[in-house]
Amino acid sequence: MSSSEPKLDRRSFFRASLGAVGGLAALAAALEPLKDFDRSDLTLDQFLQKHYKEMNAEDMQKVLDRIEKEVEKRYDVRPEIRDVKPRDGVEFVYALNLGACIGCRRCVHACVAENNQSRDPEIQYIRVLEMPRGSIDIEEGNHHYERPKVPSPDHFYMPIQCQQCENPPCVKVCPVEATWQEPDGLTVIDYDWCIGCRYCEAACPYWARRFNFTEPSIPKDDLNPNMSYLSNRPRKQGVMEKCHFCLHRTREGRMPACLEVCPVGARKFGNIRDPESEVSKILKNKHVFVLKQEVGTHPRFFYYFDEDYGPAIHGEGR
Amino acid sequence: MGQEKTSRNGRHAAPGWVPGWALGPILLVLAAWLHWGGLLAEIPHAATPAFDHAALSTAPRRKILGDPPTLKINDFDRTCMDCHKIFKTPTDKPRPLNQHKNIHMDHGPNVKCSTCHDWDDRDKLVRPDGVSIPFTKVVDQCGQCHVRIRYDWGYGIHGRTNGYWDPKSGPQERRICTECHDPHNPKSPAMDPISPLPGPHTLRLTNPHGEHDQ
């Protein structure tokens, strides 16, 4: 019996202690980020914050006050942050005239300026594809065209951003319900709830979602102080973000930033439930199509070609 | 008993098998590598290239004319008729212009000035039916021929609407034809080709030339 008991000899003692020291050191290394806990922005309030849908007005006000302080501390700018709720009887729809778009990327950069995306590393919600005329083959599309002047007569341009699907695959895959669809059709993200697993990014067939791989950086002067909780408040490292049709503007009745900057008026936005709205007229009168119809996402973003405008814009034909 | 010992020894002897006590140090080295020299040290990325932010102006590209249209000459606002009442234009037929040389006329079959301009009152436009209309109502003038686009414009399909999508919440800013198009030369190109702003230099859409990659 005594012979089967483990014997603490010199060798096994060194083995065990080396293992223990190594293990403890590895544990210490793993816990090392907690050293910065005091310096990080994570407060107990934020840690114990409820889900967006479970917060009442009072809870939300506390959260907004906290975010306001955080932003002021970080950027030296006092933001005007609020939680804009969807309106009754409103469903947002976007329409884009591909015959008019000249691929100037004004929309891309107006969006970045409006929505406080990171400038370094760069995050953009809108991608503009340059494709050869006569086909719509997105695989042939090129994001990186660099020309002294656009449009190129041999190409057309297709801006792609979040399509605000009626059947959004990104929402279904989120394991923590940090992203959901609002009654006015906008799919939103709670940046405080997102765990950064990037499932939604993988699920999106339009490549519309962006991930903050590093701490986003925005020059203080470039910060847009007009913010809302679900849209353009500053994000942190490790959370997803995407286009939300500028909901802090559009829910107050204004046009999105990408539309207002478009030099050719290719972008149209409005309430599809209003039969007199611009987008309702377009859907009634133009041959619209959606991107990747076959995947069944039912986008709220419609593209159309206006055959009468295209040649006029590009100075050819007629 | 003896068999157990043999098998244990056998496993000890197997190549590539890591003894339990070495796991700690291995993890430690791994953590140190991740922390100081390895994957987590720096994620390569590129910042937005600088560009002129004036390009993001939402102002219309062209100025529109008032009623009557005025031009600053020696700090005085002059209307068209201030000159045209003195200098009579002799005939109304296509000819090289002595004045207004900045006008490049290329508007399809419309080669005569009087197709659109009122010959008796130069502060006005004239419709094909002979009715004088002010420059501010240029939409009606263009719409005489470009009927479908005029209809689309009326619905808000053609042309940009700034301000509010919901007219009940605030004012809408509509652009009229000549705020974007040159009426004398609308065809070639309606919008001057413009320089594109920088393309994506994001993590997953890095520049194909690798210029901005670290």
Image: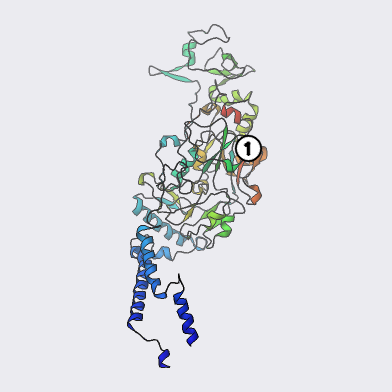
User: Looking at the image, which residue is at 45% across and 80% down?
Assistant: B9
User: Looking at the image, which residue is at 59% across and 41% down?
Assistant: A95
Q: Nearer the viewer, residue A254 or A195?
A: A195
**Residue A132, position as x, y percentages in the image:** 59, 35
**Residue A230 against residue B166 in the figure, above or below:** below
**Quadrant housing residue A27:** bottom left
Q: Nearer the viewer, residue B65 or B101?
A: B101
Residue A26 falls left or right of residue A267 = left
Q: Residues within 10 Å of mark 1 (few under 14, many from 20)?
A: few
User: Looking at the image, which residue is at 35% across and 65% down?
Assistant: A32
- The number of numbered discs placed on residues in the rendered structure image is 1
**Residue B23 against residue A278 in the figure, above or below:** below
**Residue A64, position as x, y percentages in the image:** 42, 57
Q: Which residue is mark 1?
A: A135
**Residue B196 against residue A22 in the figure, above or below:** above
**Quadrant housing residue A130:** top right
Q: Nearer the viewer, residue A309 or B25?
A: B25
**Residue B34, position as x, y percentages in the image:** 38, 61
**Residue B135 against residue A286 in the figure, above or below:** above
